[in-house]
Image (tube, rainbow, N blue to C red):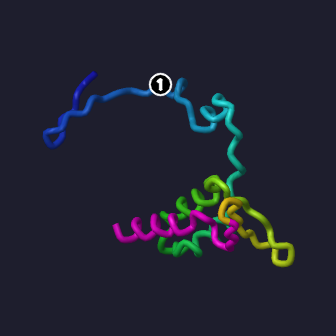
Amino acid sequence: MAEVHSNNVSYAQKSIDENTLLIPSMVSQQAGEIPQAPRPTGPEVAEVARKLGIDLVFDSDLLYIAEDLLMSPLPDFWQVHRDESSGKAYYHNTATQVTQWAHPLEQYYRGLVFMRKEG
């Protein structure tokens, strides 16, 4: 392996064989985990992005955060339900009996958006 020196730090250059590279979906299938949910639609990502404070025009590079929230599993004891009259999702914690409209991880993801915008 050749070494590259940059600012007094040495890095070993490595090559990757793309034929043996495992992508996350392959790893989860091999480990016997449940496959991930289908990717969210554009309108779903846009709705969540607005809730997180992401401007669809000026912050389009942050849309991955909204998509990540939609793809994240719920924390322990949380369940998602649908309101029969409005069709809106709401969340219920079976351990604390708390019910709320906001996704339980929404505040965390808002913090990520804030840090990416400010940082």
Say what amino acid the circle numbered 1 marks. Asp
The residue labelled by disc 1 is 17
Q: In this view, does 15 lie to the left or right of 24?
A: left
> Residue 118 in magenta?
yes
Instruction: Report the residue that reaches farthest toward the right.
Output: 84
Front in this rendered view, residue 76 or 60: 76
**Viewer-proximal residue among 108 and 7:** 108
Find out whether residue 88 is within the magenta segment: no
Q: Residue 88 is drawn in which quadrant?
A: bottom right
Position of 14 relative to 69 (above/below): above
Quadrant including the C terminus: bottom left
SS category of the residue bearing label 1? loop
Residue 67 at what x, y percent from top left? 60, 59
The residue located at (62%, 69%) in the rendering is: 48
Q: Where is residue 75 in the image (x, y as percent from the top left)?
A: 61, 55
Q: Which residue is more in the foreground, 44 or 115? A: 115
Magenta span: 97-119
Tell me what residue is drawn at x 39 percent, y 67 percent. Answer: 115
Q: Position of 77 compared to 20: left or right?
A: right
Which residue is depicted at the point 67% across and 56% down?
77
Give the residue furthest to the bottom: 85
Residue 97's spot in the image, x, y percent? 70, 67
Q: Is residue 69 above or below residue 56?
A: above
Q: How crowded is mark 1: few (under 14 residues within 10 Å), some or many (20 or more)?
A: few
Quadrant holding the N terminus:
top left
Q: Nearer the viewer, residue 62 or 33?
A: 33
